[in-house]
Image: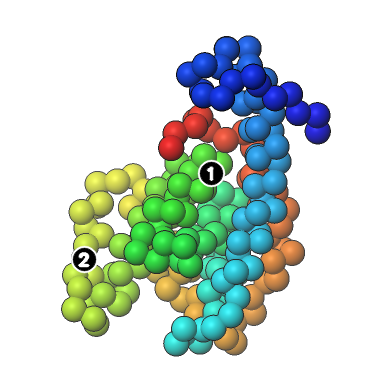
Amino acid sequence: MATTNGTFTRMDDATPEELAVVISEAQLHLNDRVADRLLEQLDTLKGPTLGYQVDRYEHSLQTATRALRDGAGTDMVVTALFHDIGDALAPANHSELAAAILSPYVDEEAAWVVRHHGVFQGYHYWHKIGFDRDARERYRGSPHFDAAVRFCGEWDQQAFDPAYDTLPIEAFEPMVREVFARPASGFGGD
């Protein structure tokens, strides 16, 4: 790809014409490889099981497999695949990190579910470790509440089974490429 460099050294010195060219080229270059980079990042979840029966990579594939077999749409299946993508980088707020990555590409329901899946997952075990399992109730009025209950109850919290017939990553790659080939909603932000 031919690159046209602007003459500016500060954003506020750039002309509208320079910004149109530079931003357009940068966005095309960066957006072109989002699917590849996310699949590479998913690979980083391979490794120690951290006390679970499967590693985070297998858990992600298993969650997506369960969603697919349960008839979920493409956006929700891709969300299931990447719902824990933030585990290694942001263990304290992995749900928000995954949502920040996925939200520009998936529908509103899938974006909401991934953003809130941490607290909805808590329903299945928080009471066993001294936390409020009903913390998800504060979202009861959301139109996506039931989708998050289903996501965690039927797919996420059950996806730690080493004997489950999990589909390989190749089964999901076409969906991943479809979702991340879409124009991202919104612009910029920091």
Q: Is residue 43 visible?
A: yes
Query: How far from the left and from the top, in percent, is residue 139?
Result: 25, 51
- Residues under numbered marks 1 and 2 in contact, where contact means CB atoms less than 8 Å apart: no
As drawn, 57 above or below 9: below
Looking at the image, which is closer to me, 159 or 185?
A: 185
The answer for how far apart the CA atoms under marks 1 and 2 are is: 27 Å
Local crowd size for mark 1, using a 10 Å CA cut-off: few (<14), some (14–19), many (≥20): many
Query: How far from the left and from the top, in percent, is residue 180?
Result: 64, 44
As drawn, 103 above or below 96: above
Residue drawn 29% across the image and 46% down it: 142
Q: Is residue 69 visible?
A: no
Mark 1 is on which residue type?
Val
Mark 2 is on which residue type?
Asp
Query: How far from the left and from the top, in percent, is residue 7?
Result: 64, 19
Q: Residue furthest right?
A: 1
Residue drawn 36% across the image and 59% down it: 93
As drawn, 46 above or below 163: above
Q: Which residue is mark 1?
A: 106
Query: How far from the left and from the top, in percent, is residue 103?
Result: 48, 44
Looking at the image, which is closer to me, 96 or 74?
A: 96
Mark on residue 134? Answer: 2
Q: Secondary structure at mark 1?
A: loop
Local crowd size for mark 2, using a 10 Å CA cut-off: few (<14), some (14–19), many (≥20): some
